[in-house]
């Protein structure tokens, strides 16, 4: 058997330590993993993978400590809420007990008064006739029936008002179908509102609902018919004015339409991050010639500043970024913290094929992993496939919402 050189022995020891670190990370043993990384640094201070794991562990440690603080705060809040609930329950029980005591006392007092009256009647030798008792019972029954009838009328009134609101909403939708109401329609609505007993507050609320509903229908119809196109984008503003819709309303619908317009006019935007300037230039030129809009950065810090303000269609980043404050793993996690970037395809690049490294990237949610060197055909096919899958997922989600 060939004897290991000192360097081979160091690599083997480092590989074993990193595998233990990987298992400890998956087990949530962050502190033990950090101690293992410190030992690895002492053995091989210049190993880039050790620093990549060290950076990853530093980030996880911060997240772990943050989660612990949140958990402590949550437990304190729950304990405080439990004490409040216990105090409220105790007070409620005390109040119920006090009310029960008062009821029993009043009942005893009432019983005493009744007994006293009976004794007075007995002393006066007066007795209540059966006919009088029946008359009192009939009076009580009539009073109860009147109360039940009043409650029934109240329920009928609420149901009738609900029908009136539905009828008025339907009329509002009808008159708003072609846009803002005319003076004649306003007059008719005012008369209908008076006849149906619709309040000013109810009128305002229902009008806003009808405006939005009609605007949405017109919006969808215009898009389907092609009235709103990239060449006639001003139709969108005219449509809002027609239905008196503020730009802030229905942002989600308009954002989706505008996104489709944007993708039909502009090529997909790809963010590329690599501290190898030569590779950065070559890949950028290749993708530009393939029709992509390229945003190339030599540091993850510059790329992250761009991503905080912009939304690309795909992100490609090297793992080992020696000139950046964030390595590839941290850069991926930071981008995933931005809601609008969570589903953007993310591809890792690396000069080495390491099972632990690849598994770590996949656990963080990376969409693909490419090993340098790679061919232009492989790169273009990977990007095309990721963009196609992202587009289908987005369309499926939009159909589900619709």
Image (spheres, rainbow, N blue to C red):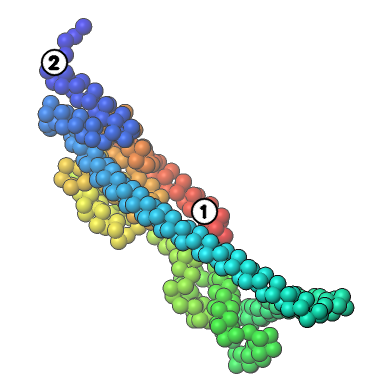
Residue lying farthest to the top in this orientation: 1
User: Does residue 153 appear in this view?
Assistant: no
Q: Residue at left 58%, top 83%? A: 203
Residue lying farthest to the right in this orientation: 131
The residue that disc 1 covers is 397
- Tell me whether the residue at label 1 lies in contact with that at label 2, contact meaning CB atoms closer than 8 angstroms: no
Left or right of residue 395, residue 53 in this image:
left
Q: Position of residue 172 (x, y in %)?
A: 63, 81
Left or right of residue 98, residue 376 in this image:
left
Q: Position of residue 115 (x, y in %)?
A: 70, 72
Q: Nearer the viewer, residue 211 or 265?
A: 211
Q: Residue at left 27%, top 26%? A: 19
Vertically, is 73 above or below 12? Answer: below
Q: Secondary structure at mark 2?
A: loop
Q: Position of residue 212 (x, y in %)?
A: 55, 74
Vertically, is 309 above or below 335? Answer: below
Q: Position of residue 29 (x, y in %)?
A: 28, 33
The residue that disc 2 covers is 5
Instruction: Point out the tag, 1 or 2, that comes first from the N-terminus.
Output: 2
Instruction: Name the image quarter holding the N terminus.
Output: top left
Left or right of residue 128, residue 286 in this image:
left
Q: Residue at left 53%, top 61%? A: 97
Left or right of residue 287, residue 84 in this image:
right
């Amino acid at each position: 058997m060939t004897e290991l050189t000192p360097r081979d022995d160091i690599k083997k020891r480092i590989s074993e330590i990193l595998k233990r670190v990987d298992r400890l990370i998956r087990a949530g043993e962050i502190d033990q993993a950090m101690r293992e990384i410190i030992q690895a640094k002492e053995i091989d201070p210049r190993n880039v993978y050790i620093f990549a794991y060290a950076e990853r562990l530093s980030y996880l440690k911060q997240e772990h400590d943050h989660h612990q603080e949140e958990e402590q705060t949550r437990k304190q809040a729950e304990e405080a809420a439990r004490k409040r609930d216990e105090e409220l329950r105790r007070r409620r029980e005390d109040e119920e007990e006090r009310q029960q005591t008062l009821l029993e006392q009043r009942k005893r007092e009432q019983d005493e008064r009744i007994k006293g009256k009976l004794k007075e009647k007995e002393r006066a030798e007066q007795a209540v006739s059966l006919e009088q008792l029946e008359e009192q019972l009939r009076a009580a029954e009539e009073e109860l029936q009147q109360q039940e009838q009043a409650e029934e009328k109240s329920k009928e009134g609420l149901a009738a008002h609900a029908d009136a609101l539905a009828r008025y909403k339907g009329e509002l939708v009808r008159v708003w179908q072609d846009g803002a109401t005319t003076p004649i329609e306003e007059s008719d609505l005012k008369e209908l509102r008076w006849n149906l007993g619709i309040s000013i507050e109810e009128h305002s609320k229902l009008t806003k609902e009808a405006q939005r509903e009609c605007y949405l229908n017109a919006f969808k119809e215009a898009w389907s018919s092609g009235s709103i196109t990239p060449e006639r984008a001003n139709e969108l503003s005219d449509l809002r004015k027609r239905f008196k819709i503020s730009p802030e309303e229905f942002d989600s619908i308009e954002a989706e339409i505008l996104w489709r317009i944007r993708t039909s006019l502009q090529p997909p935007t790809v963010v590329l991050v690599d501290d190898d300037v030569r590779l950065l230039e070559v890949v950028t030129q290749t993708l530009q010639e393939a029709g992509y809009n390229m945003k190339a950065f030599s540091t993850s810090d510059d790329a992250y500043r761009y991503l905080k303000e912009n939304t690309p269609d795909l992100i490609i980043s090297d793992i080992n970024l020696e000139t950046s404050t964030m390595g590839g793993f941290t850069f991926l996690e930071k981008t995933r913290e931005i809601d609008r970037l969570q589903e953007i395809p993310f591809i890792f690049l690396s000069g080495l094929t390491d099972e632990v490294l690849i598994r770590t990237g996949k656990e963080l949610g990376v969409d693909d992993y490419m090993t340098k060197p790679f061919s232009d055909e492989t790169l273009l096919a990977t990007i095309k496939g990721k963009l196609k899958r992202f587009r289908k997922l987005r369309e499926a989600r939009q159909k589900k919402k619709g």
